[in-house]
Image (cartoon, rainbow, N blue to C red):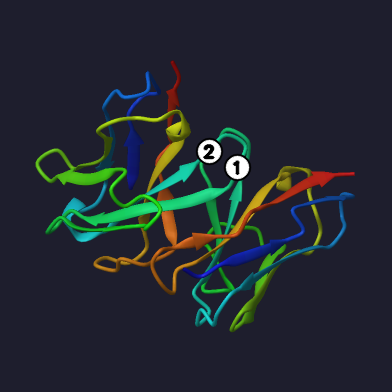
Amino acid sequence: EVQLVQSAAEVKKPGESLKISCEASGYTFTTYWIDWVRQMPGKGLEWVGVIFPGDSDTRYSPSFQGQVTISADTSLNTAYLQWSSLKASDTAIYYCARGFWPGASQTPFHYWGQGTLISVSS
Amino acid sequence: DIQMTQSPSSLSASVGDRVTITCQASQDINNFLNWYQQKPGKAPKLLIYDASTLETGVPVRFSGSGSGTDFSLTISSLQPEDIATYFCQQYDDLPLTFGGGTKVEIK
């Protein structure tokens, strides 16, 4: 059974760094792209970016380019989303998601993590 | 970026009603259009992909249609468990983009 299990909620201050995780199981981690999606409080869904763990090929939304870093550790079957300096506007739930088709960077999101709530406040 | 315009932003209907949500893309997306359902406090769930293909396990009262730039999601007979927010999403081109969402409530 495919599962994406995300790290726990975080409360941080502006300027702090953070790395959240998405641990995959039930499939070959290196063969599917993993995406990150943001949902600000009471708002819609925004695509952050995607990584192919097989070769670390990464694509970002222009809205998030330079603001976050996506990475993956194939030894741990885990993808990451990190910030070097958080802002209050980063407060949101962040979901990881995996698509249908191996090797395809653009697919429907068939599997989702449970979400990680990030709260940034002074 | 491809803009996805979803309407209405909210609706209220009675149990058993037929409900339709529309989604318009700013350019032809080659039917690479998905619909998701999100219940409060939960991750989104894929309902329909490629504009009209029902995801496994999704009730047949849900259906999708459309092509080119104009798409719709229909619930043929609204049930209490369908209370949720629905999002369309295009995956024809990066960045992937979502519609603003439609919140469905029971009248």
Foreground pick, A66 / A114:
A66
Q: Measured from the top left, where is residue A22 in percent x and y?
A: 29, 38
Mark 1 neighbour density, 10 Å: few (under 14) some (14–19) many (20 or more) = few
- The answer to whether residue A92 is above or below residue A53 is above
The residue lying at 76 percent from left, 48 percent from top is B104
- The answer to whether residue A24 is above or below residue A89 is below
Q: Which residue is mark 1?
A: A43
Q: Measured from the top left, where is residue B69 in percent x and y?
A: 61, 79
Q: Measured from the top left, where is residue B11 in percent x and y?
A: 82, 52
Could you say which quadrant of the image residue A122 lies in? top left
Quadrant where the C terminus of chain B lies?
top right
The residue lying at 27 percent from left, 37 percent from top is A82
Label 1 close to label 2 by CB (< 8 Å): yes
Horizontally, residue A85 falls left or right of residue B60, namely left
Q: Which residue is mark 2?
A: A40
The amino acid type found where label 1 is placed reads Lys
